Amino acid sequence: MSGRARLALGAWAATLMAACALLPLVSPATWILQAAFLLGVQSAVGALTRRVPLARPLTVAAQALVTLLILTLAFARQQAFLGIVPGPEAFQHFADLLQQGSDDIARYAIPAPLESDGIRLMLLGGVLIIGLAVDTLAVTFRSAAPAGLPLLALYSVAAGLSDGGADWLWFLVAAGGYLMLLLAEGRDRLSQWGRVFGGAPRTPGGEPGPVAPVRTGRRIGVLALGIALVVPVALPAMNGGLLDGAGTGVGSGNGSGGTISAVNPLVSLRDSLNVDQDRQVLTLKTNTNDISDLYLRIVSLDDFDGSTWKPSKRHITSVPDKLPTPTGLGPDVKRAEIETRISAADWYAQDWLPMPYPPSDVNVSGKWRYEPVGMTLVGDHGETTRGKTYLVKSLDVQPTAEQLADAPEPSAAMRREYTRLPSSVPAVVAKTARQVTEGATNHYEQAVKLQEYFASTGGFQYSTQVQVGTGPNAIAKFLKDKEGFCVHFSFAMAAMARSLGIPARVAVGFAPGSPQADKSITVGLKDAHAWPELYFEGVGWTRFEPTPTRGVAPSYTQSDSTGSTLPDVTQPSTSAGSSASAAPSASTSCSSQDRKLEACSEALPLDTGKPGDSGPPWYQITGWVLLGLLVVAAPLLPMLWRLRRRSVRLASAQHASAGRTPAGAGRARGPGRGSTDVDMESPPMAVEADERYAAEVAAGHVLAVWRELTDTAWDYGITPDDALTPRKAAARIVRLGQLDPATAESVHRVASAVEQVLFSPRPHAVPGLADEVRRMRAALRSQVSWATRVRAVVAPRSAVRAVWDLMDRWTAVKAGAAERWAATLTRLRRPAGEQSQSG
């Protein structure tokens, strides 16, 4: 393998090893295989264009063009011309995918689902861009050291987004790739100086040690690696990030089922509510007539650190056949079991399973684990809701106001875990809670007053344009500005309930969706919601709805169903563009006219549990990529073959004029391998053999240059005539090409060299022949029209020799095969007498 090929392989491996730092961010990690293949295609294109050779800028342009084509084939085939040539629609599609990827990054916690085409484009496109930069610097421009900068950028992005658990491992992998690239470049540079001799033995009789440059390179590599490992210790840690879940809401947990992750409510809820076009997430069919309380809970957030709510890290177990009765629910509370069939959209990949609360039985395919405290199911080893259809049986708990008002104090353990507030919570939170609930005689009345304060009497406005806010003062700012969306209302009410001694947590999921003509219910992105759950002994965790214009206030908080002396709770008002009633608002995915026409019945098949197709499989993409490259490269093959042939012919002439032979052309003669000098101590026969061999090599070089001269003239319209002698052929080229005297002399000089090697008893190499051919080519180029010049480069006439060469080789192969077959038959058909003698 040549030095440049080793360098290209090192650049490919270094980029791929640095890209491994992105593996923990996306699940599943199969994208790395596709990235490896696409990087290989990109590197192969660079290797081919450098071998032609093309100018360095053209090499980079060719790699960039092929990169764009394969990305178009993989992501925008439907919008591209012939499925591979990008146009305005394809570029617009790329922009849409990048925007979708940016939204999905904000929506999902680590690991984000690979099913998102936007995230996949950002991953593969980013790796290919870094790969192009590394290949350009390290291979095309022969400067491997600066190639570490794009590799560092790739690793830094991954480190900035990860949770920091195994950053050191990925750093070692990326650093190993960079050191391997430096080593490949060092070996390539040393090889240009000649043989690498071993140094003096380190110990008497021992093996020679590495040469000084190699030892120095190792020391530099070890020192650089050590500095890179030590310096980050003194720098601020890069915690958090766009994909971080542990620090900004719903994040990672532990347990026997593996890493738990879910949507980040602080970011993804607002993004879901602000989408321009509602996107269908789930479709439900249920046997209950009242869907106003059919909230789908994804996860509960019970750990409040003063800045945000997140799920506690809890142990998870296998899913039991029958889920237990929820904590705190007594036998006297009225309940009914309802059955709901839920189908998730093909694009919706959620690690947690959306279910009505409290579930009593779940029938779902795949690998799922059960978290007993929150009564939630979480996917194990990459299992998600994507395309799932599952059946959930749940309890419709119907407590009365009296039961809630008469609930005894919760246990000490419940109070200790679910009423804890950090000291960083501003005092205004508890102060406002006491003011709002003044006059209440029990925890239930306090909870109803808090709900009423946020939903109607407190002057709060619902708005999804408000920033979520961070830090301990976020709740205080919300209480002052009185503007926010469900995250603000649920977080604030839960914190204020805890300040009053009421166990509280926050649930994240979906509000009741929109009824359809076929009696199904669709749930869209705009139905994403968060609400507080308060604990009452004997009833359990109970939902409240403090967010105005969202959802429905529970019946047990309304005075007409309680029989108590509580004041009437004003129902949440409806603002423009929002709806809040017992019948949830219609989703924008199905208009009222469509429902009348029963046009929404096929919105999502309810009987399928198979994941949808997020795109063509990798082998199909591979086939299309190869086909596209063939379509693009086929018209360029004559040009590439001609450029390569010219480069080889003229390079051989330069080697011959310098007294060298190409690699592999000479015979090994010890330390002076490839030299044309004659060893004075060699025997006369050996000297004569070497002289004869050198003459044959010189003749081959001169004839190669002559063939290049005649082919160049052919490309510019002067058809060769093999019946003429070299001298007459040269005169014909000068006459037809109308060459000036200086150029004519160059052509005749090449012809004289040809006659010398053909007829002289001791032919020898003639220096400068390659320059004579280049001079003639420049003169011919200046004499012809631009169309002839373009054809001479893009579609050279002499490229037909490639076909002739293939035909000659095929003839030779057939002749050789026929000879071998005849020899085999001769061995098998021995005379009868010989057979008897051998017997």
Image (cartoon, helix red, strand yellow):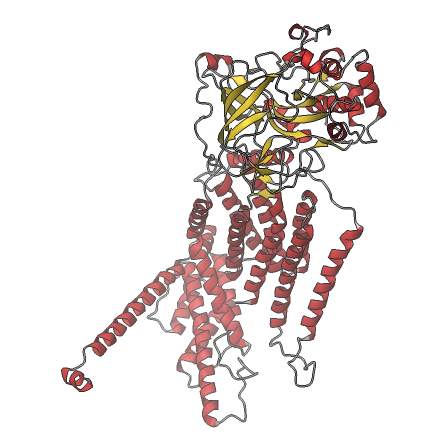
Name the residue rendered at 58%, 29% in the picture.
324
Name the residue rendered at 64%, 39% in the picture.
315
Name the residue rendered at 70%, 46% in the picture.
164
Position in image of residue 512 (x %, y %): 58, 19
Position in image of residue 348 (x %, y %): 54, 32
Residue 380's image quarter? top right
Name the residue rendered at 51%, 19% in the picture.
521
Near-viewer residue (107 or 760): 107
What is the number of callouts on the image? 0
In the rendered view, tell whether residue 780 sits above or below residue 121.
below
Q: Residue furthest front?
A: 331
Position in image of residue 214 (x %, y %): 67, 71
Residue 575 in sight: no
Residue 348 in sight: yes
Image quadrant occupied by the C terminus: bottom left
Near-viewer residue (504 or 79): 504
In the rendered view, tell whether residue 797 sits above or below residue 215.
above
